[in-house]
Amino acid sequence: MVKTRAATTKEQYMLRAASISLWFNIVLFIFKLTALIVVHSLAIATDFAITVVGLTVSVILYNSLKLSVRPADLLHNYGYGKVEHVCEAMEGIVLIGIAAIMSFQAFATFFHPSHVTFPWIGFASSMLSLTLNFVGAFFIFQLARKSSSPAVRAEGVHYTLEGFISTAIACAFMVTILLKNSAYEHIAPYIDPAVTMLVSFAISLPSIKLARQAFVNLLDISIEEPGKMEIVVRLARHADYYCNFEDLKTRTAGHKKFIEVKIVMPKDMPFFKAHEVVSKIERDIAQGVPDSEVTVIMMPCLKNCGWLQNNKPCPYLSSGSV
């Protein structure tokens, strides 16, 4: 299939999103590692662990997206688009694992609480982190919409989750600062593990949803309903030139869509004209469903229709030129 300018532009959006994610994660890694060394906080440790995962996934994502845009070959006849769903599933599973581990650690810390050192530094680090995360999420979601890539969208979800995590941790540090030297100072050591458990629970639900959707997509899920309706509309435009269509199949692989349909053509129609009809249908469907590869299979009619059984001429043979 010939690569269109639109397809090339979408691939550029995907790679740009991966580059943004990689550089933002490098900056976040440096700031959070510094904060973790200075501030002994379980919440920051959780946040840092998620950033380590994010940085690792960003490296994998960048290389995977470069692989996903490769054209089909002898080993992968439908291309490499499904690697985007693999990245999506991997990100969801790893986040679920981090949530489970940190929840257990936070629960254990309740029995041996300790005061957080330098909470002002932790607060400043968290404010910087939430700013970078939300700014990164904004740009990545924009590129996800332009590229229609599930892997890029998953990375946007990751950044948004990190932004809310950093917001919760910043609030926890502020509460700790307010409780210090007050009558409720004895409560301060419990704020850190409590926020860690809250954050772990908050990231687990969307992460489970993310992983579940990725696995569903890996099982050759069909395209969305509006896309199917668009295919039927496009087929109807050419209804004067074929007898019937059947066995419409669709599936997705990353941002790419694959469409297959069988067209019943008049048996006595010249081959060159039938081929012309089929080619025009393929082009029309591809224009209506972006990032799609369309395959139309010609099938001869069995001459069992009402027209021929009543000795009437086939109306499709008398149609005008395509």
Image: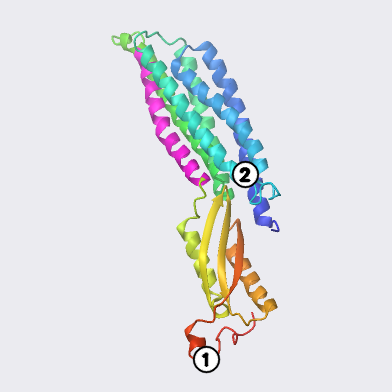
Magenta segment boundaries in residue numbering: 190-218
Name the residue type under label 2. Met
Between residues 19 and 168, which one lies in front from this camera angle?
Answer: 19
Q: Is residue 122 above or below residue 276?
A: above
Q: Position of residue 112 (x, y in %)?
A: 37, 7
Name the residue type under label 1. Lys
Q: CA distance from mark 2 to mark 1?
A: 55 Å
Q: Is residue 181 above or below residue 144?
A: above
Q: Which residue is mark 1?
A: 312
Q: Position of residue 303 (x, y in %)?
A: 54, 82
Display coloring: rainbow
Q: Which residue is mark 2?
A: 14
Between residues 276 and 96, which one lies in front from this camera angle?
Answer: 276
Q: Position of residue 269 (x, y in %)?
A: 64, 81
Q: Which of the marked residues, 2 or 1, is nearer the chain's N terminus?
A: 2
Magenta-colored segment: predominant secondary structure: helix
